[in-house]
Every structure is written in C-alpha cells, then in structure tokens.
Image (cartoon, rainbow, N blue to C red):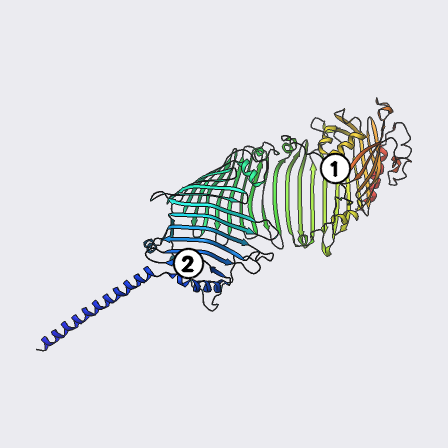
Amino acid sequence: MVISILHSDMEKNEMTGRLFLKITGISLAIVLTLAILFLWTFDFGVLKPKLESTLSDVIDREFRINGDFSLKLLPTPTLLFEDLTLANPSWGSEPEMLTAGKGYMEIKLMPLFSERIEVEKLQLENIRLLVESSADDKSNWEFDLAQNNDAEPEQKNEADKAAFSYDIQTADMSNIVVIYRQPDAEDLSLRVESFTVNQRDSATTEINGTGRFIDIPLSVSGQVSEHHTDLRAQAGEVKLVSKYDYPEDTVNFSSSLSTLSDLGGLLKIEELPDTELSLEGHVSMSKGNVMLKRVVASTKGIRITLDGEIDTGTSRVELSARASGDKLSLLSPDLPPLPFEIQSEFMLAGNKVDMPSYRVQIGSSTLTGKAHIENNERPVIHLQAKSDLIDLTPFINHQPASKPKAEKTEAKSNGETHYIFDETPLPFDTLQALSLDTDLSITRLIVQDAEFKNVTIQAQAKNGKMTVSNAFEGKLSGKYDNKLTLNTSDKKADIRIDTKVRDLKLALLSGASVPEEQIPVSNMNIDLHSSGDSPRALASNLDGNVVANQGKGKVSNALIEKFTGDILTQLFNAINPFAEKEEFTQWECSLFAIEFESGEGDIEGFLMQSEQLMVVGGGNIDLNQETLAIEFNTKPREGVGVSADMFVTPFVKLSGTLAQPSVGLNNKGVLLSGGAAVLTGGMSFLYKGLMDRVTAEAGRCEEAETALKDRQNSAEPDQ
C-alpha cells in the first residue's frame, strides 16, 4: 500500500517536471522568436541622438550625423550614414577634421561566429580627412578621452585576443581626400578618385584604383587571393610590378620598379641610371617582431642585402647589411669605375645608433671600424676607423662626363658687402653639449703621386672643449703635425692652430716621373689664434703667423693648375710666363711669410726663384674687410737665355675681396715701388734695390733661407 502511494507520487512529480520543461522551452522559444523579430525589424537609427551626444562627450569633440543614419543587425548587419562630421580641436586650422558624404556597409552574419568578418558590400563617397599638427606639437588625431581613472585596465592574454580574419567582397569608393598639414610647410594631399573591389570568383578578388598624390597621378590594379597577390602600381612615370605569397605568418615578395631615372625625376634626384630596380625577400612575424630574411634590392651591377629583426613593441631595429657593386660609377657618374663592397651591423633604438662593426672596400682601399651615435639634447659621436691602405688617386684622376656649364651671371650690388666669414653666431649650445671621440689611423694614404705613411686623425670634444690632432709622415722624408684646440665657454670661442712641417718631401706637385733627389723639400710653421662669437669675429681677431719655404726641385706646371683653383692658376701663370709653355719649372727656392694682427695680415716676405726668373711679392690681406692687396714683381735672370723684353708687364696684382678676387697686370708697381716701404718684416732685404734693376742676376735663396731660419728659431720656445 505504501509502495503504491509512493509510486503514484513519483509519477505525478515526473509529469509535473516534464510539464515545467515544456512550458520553459516554449517560453524561451517565444522570447527568442520575439527577440529575433525585434532585431529583424528594429532600426537602431533611432538612437542617433544618443550616439552623437555620447561620442561627443567621450572624445570631447562635436560628432554629428546630419543626414540619414541606419543600423540593422538582422537578417544582414547593415550600417548607413550620410553627411557625417567630426570637429577639429579649437586650435585647428579648419572647423572639421572629418566630413563624410556617405557610407554604407553590409556584413555577413554567420561568419562572425567563426571569427571571420566578411564585408559583402562597402561604399564610401565624398570623404575628407584633415590630419594636422600645431606649432607646439599637438596633433588633431589625439583625443582627450573621458575615462574612469579609478578603474584598473583589463589585462588580456594573447590567447584571449580575438584573431578575426577579414574579407571584402565588393567595395566602391570615390572622392576620398586625405590632407596632411604642418606649420610652415605646404600641405600634402592624397586623393582617391576611385577604388573598387570585386570578387571575381570564390578564390580571387580584383582591385582597381586611380588618384593623385599632390600633383602626381596614381593608379593601382591587382588580383588578391587567400595566399597570393599580384599587384601593378604606377606613380607618374614610375611603374611597380610585384608579387606576394603569404603562407601563414610569412610574406615572400618579388617586385620590379622601372626605372631608377624615372624615380629620380619623381623625387628630384638627378643622374640616377636608366635601369630597373628589383626587390625580393622574406618577411615574417614572430612574437610581435618583424623578421627580415635576405631582403635584396638589386639593379644593374649593384646589390644590397638586409637581414635582421624589428621589434614592433620597442621600435628597436637590429640589421646586418651588405652592399656591393661592379662599379662605383653606377651610383653616380662623378665616381670612378671601381668595384666596392660595404658590410655593416647596426642597431637602432630611439635616438641611438650602434655599429659594432663595419667594413668598406673600394678598389684596393679598405676601412674597418665601429661607431656609436646618439642624437639627443647632448649628441654623442664615437667613431673608430682603421685602414691599411686608402688610395684616392682614382677619384682624383676620374674625369666624369662633362656637364653643360651654367652661364656666369654677375651679382648685382644692393649696397651690402658679401663676406666669406659671416656674422652667423657659432652653435655654442651644440658645441658645449657635444661628446665626440674619433680615432682614425691609415697605414698608407696615396694621393696622386704622393704617398703618406702612418696617418692619424684624432678628435675629442666634451663640455665645450675640443681638440683635433692629425699627423703623417712622407714616404720619402719628413713629418707633418697639426693640433687645433677650441674652447667655447662663456659664449665665446677661443681657437688656436699649431702646425709644423719638417723636411717633408712629396711628389704631389712634381709627378711620378721626377726622380726622388729632384723633388723639393718643404717646411712650414703655422701659429694662429683668435677668439669671437662668429666666423667674422674670429677672422677679425686673428693673430699669429704663417711661414713656409720649399727647397730646390722640379714642380709640374700642369699639376699646379690641377690642384689649385681658377684664381690661383691665373695668378701663377701671370707671375710665371713659362708655366703654360714648359712641363716643369726648376725652382731653386720658394718662401712665404705673413704676420696677422687683429685680422690684418702683412706679407713679410714672398720669394720664388728659378733658373729663369725671380718673383718677389708683398702686400696685405685684411680679414676685417676681407680685401686683398698683394703685388708681385717678376724679373728675368741673366745668363739663362731670357731677356727683359720677355716681361712686358712685370707687376702682377691680386686684388678685390676674398669672395671676388681678381688678377691684374700693371706696368708700374704701387705696393712694391720704393723698395720695402710697406714691407718691414725680417726679410725686407729681398726688396731693397731689387725693383729698380732690369734683371735679378744674383740669387737670393741662401739669404732668404737664413733669415727664415733665424725668424723661425726666435719664434719657437726654448726646449
């Protein structure tokens, strides 16, 4: 009896449970159906005022949809807006940052559940975006977002981030303009006149577009599939054809650009070769880093290869680079046709550049070293370089294709004097902040027919104090030492130059054919110092002296012309009537001495004596006004097959200014007439009585060299 009653109660409970489940299921179905019907029929466009006000409050900018607005979720998520505007910040140059005439988008619903966004249709018309920055480095794309500062940001793991894929089946965009504006610069504008995307079949999508960047016409066309893209693009006359394969996280690409000369015309770069540029390589992503593997840029005879890694989180770049070519002249016709190779490892991080090693080889010349550079408020430059051999001869002898010479135009005077040393303030802040440490050593340096040994250049700068020292030895004999010191404390520069050349014998101005014993020996002392806050002040305050002499030997007249400027060549030919007729001049001595005091340089002695002639000179160089007043008198020597009537106008004058010097001929000297009235230095004996003689029969080298040594010894401090 009890059992039957319990059994009956259990059946009633089971029936009640089943009834509850049915009612619950029916209720959920009704609610779901009503929700679907609601989402199917309801247009969220009625929430436009709420959307406008909420978004305006969040970004602290006025956001308005002045035309139609529609947002539906079922059966196909659809968005439509017309006449949308987003205000610019108050400091902006225009009221609106963004205006959009029309936007329409349809997205397939079911792919969203598999983390895939398939845009079935996209339409954009009459879009204008202004991107600008202010003089105080504000940007209009930075928004002051209203947020709860008490709320802790939500932490997400990489696994929690949705990895949505994207696909656009049909798109039609027209009249889209993006303008980039900066203070004191011309606007940069990109206009998309038309851009369409059409799905040709289930696997391939075609793209086509036209537009303009500033005034350069642009076009693009291509075919895109899941793992491959073929692309053709053109900017002006420059054409790019490229292919991309992207299996998983790797992109393999190959491109060709034609031509480099067309690209140079686009970028305003002259003399690029009329050849095609090829690009190929592999780019992959690994833990947020971009990996470059054998990225190669090549053109006719030149190849550049990059390997390395770019950290997208910290913007740190670590690369190894190699550039090589058959001929350096392929880079520029002004360079000689030498094979070259450059290898380097470098790291970029913020404002720092590290080069743990680099190697440069051009022809037989090599250079190796390392470098560290920091470009910040206190610039740092550390550089080490070493070479067994650097041969500059191919660069000196190289004769590039002649260019049409620009017509000379005479400068019109506006009442202002043009100075070589201007009044631009010296960059004291930069000099005082600079940390510099460079060390260059070259075992052999060849320049034309001259060879230098054990060349060293060292420079250090810290706290506004700089020293530059360099030295070398001549291959045949002699030594050169130079030291420059600069102190820029108290907004004033104190500079000193101390140079000594002792018994230096170089074939640079003689030529390779001249025997060693016929190459002249050179000696020189330079002791100059000055102070000031601008180049002009330094020139005007210059004190010190320059004394130089060259001994007996042969000098090539052609090499003198090659290694001097036009005005010096003109002067040399004027004072030496044999320079243009004979290959060599056999000089017995050449001496020069000038003393500067407060920027005024008085030439204390000038003598050039050869077997055929003697040249004496004097005058001054005024660095205060940058004027030249120097006169030379050329006299034939007796008994060597020349006569006085060969020297029709013996007086040659170098006058004008440093910016515009000129060489003139006079029948009678002004500066040199009357002997040594203007020349009161220790070698004034060179001019006494000499001016009135028809010829300079007696040699003066021995007297001048003795006076020069006495002057030099008296100027040097006791050891």
Q: Quickly name the residue at label 2.
A: 69
Q: Position of residue 40 (x, y in %)?
A: 32, 59
Amino acid, disc 1: Glu
Quarter holding the N terminus?
Answer: bottom left
Q: Quadrant of residue 490?
A: bottom right
Relative to the observer, which residue lies in front, 518 or 210? 210
- As drawn, the residue found furthest toward the top would be 641
**Residue at (66%, 53%) from the top-left corner?**
430
Query: With respect to residue 140, does 443 lie above or below?
Result: above
**First in residue order: circle 2 vs circle 1:** 2
Relative to the observer, which residue lies in front, 95 or 358? 95
Foreground: disc 2 or disc 1? 2
**Residue at (46%, 42%) from the top-left corner?**
220
**Residue at (67%, 47%) from the top-left corner?**
459
Q: Quickly name the residue at label 1.
A: 410
- As drawn, the residue found furthest toward the front would be 67
Query: With respect to residue 407, does 192 lie above or below?
Result: below
Assign a secondary structure to mark 2: strand
Amino acid, disc 2: Phe
Count the marks: 2
Mark linked to residue 85: none
Query: With respect to residue 460, does 632 lie above or below?
Result: above
